[in-house]
Amino acid sequence: MKFKNILTITSLGVSLSLPFLQHQSWSLFKWLDSLFLVGLLLLVIYAIMILIEAEFFIAFIKSFKHFYGRINKKEQLIRESEIRSNVTVSYRKIFPSRKSFFQIGLLLCTVSLLASTAIYYFGR
């Protein structure tokens, strides 16, 4: 089974069981709310993966290490004695399933939003 199919089935399973965990009852409206929340969670996971891949936090880590090395006398002495440079090795993390999180999250959010809108406007 492909990862996308597993993620879709898992997301639908979680969205079906989430109303029972929150409200101890199930209804179409609660299911649509949980479907939207699961889709939103998948989009947030996708955004976190993008930030990690783009090495967004690396600049903060490097600047903190540089600042700490400048204000700490002990660290300065260690760097001078070991002839250590400020350049650190960066490791690039690549997530192969990133696109699946975006597609399924967007699909779940869109379907739940359209279904909720249709029920609200045409269900009266």
Image (cartoon, rainbow, N blue to C red):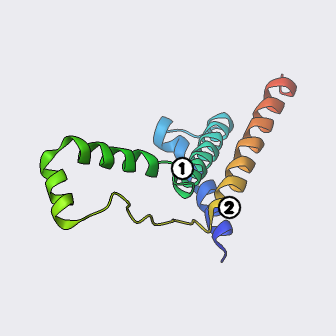
Dividing the image into 4 quarters, which one contains the C terminus?
top right
In this view of the protein, which residue sits in the foreground, 48 or 90?
90
Task: From the viewer's perspective, tell me whether residue 115 is left or right of residue 2.
Answer: right
Task: From the viewer's perspective, tell me whether residue 26 is left or right of residue 100.
Answer: left
Instruction: Please tell me whether mark 2 or mark 1 is closer to you in this view.
Output: 1
- Residue found at the far bottom of this picture: 1
Dividing the image into 4 quarters, which one contains the N terminus?
bottom right
Residue 69 circle label? none
Task: From the viewer's perspective, tell me whether residue 124 is left or right of residue 91.
Answer: right
Can you identify the residue that label 1 sits on? 48
Residue at the (32%, 47%) spot, across then down: 66
Instruction: Tell me where residue 54 appears, x and y as whole percent.
Output: 57, 54
Instruction: Measure the C-alpha gap from mark 2 to mark 1.
Output: 14 Å
**36 relative to 121, above or below:** below
Disc 1 crowd, CA 10 A, few/some/many (<14, 14-19, 20+): few
Can you identify the residue that label 2 sits on? 100
Residue at the (77%, 44%) spot, across then down: 111
**107 relative to 87, above or below:** above
Total residue callouts = 2
Q: Earlier in the sequence, mark 2 or mark 1?
A: 1
Q: Quadrant of residue 79?
A: bottom left
Residue at the (65%, 40%) spot, across then down: 36
**50 relative to 6, above or below:** above
SS type, badge 1: helix
In this view of the protein, which residue sits in the foreground, 105 or 49?
49
Q: Amino acid at mark 2?
A: Ser
Q: Amino acid at mark 1?
A: Ile
Instruction: Tell me where residue 112 appears, x and y as whole percent.
Output: 73, 40
Instruction: Tell me where residue 19 appears, x and y as whole percent.
Output: 54, 41
**123 relative to 109, above or below:** above
Residue at the (47%, 43%) spot, across then down: 21
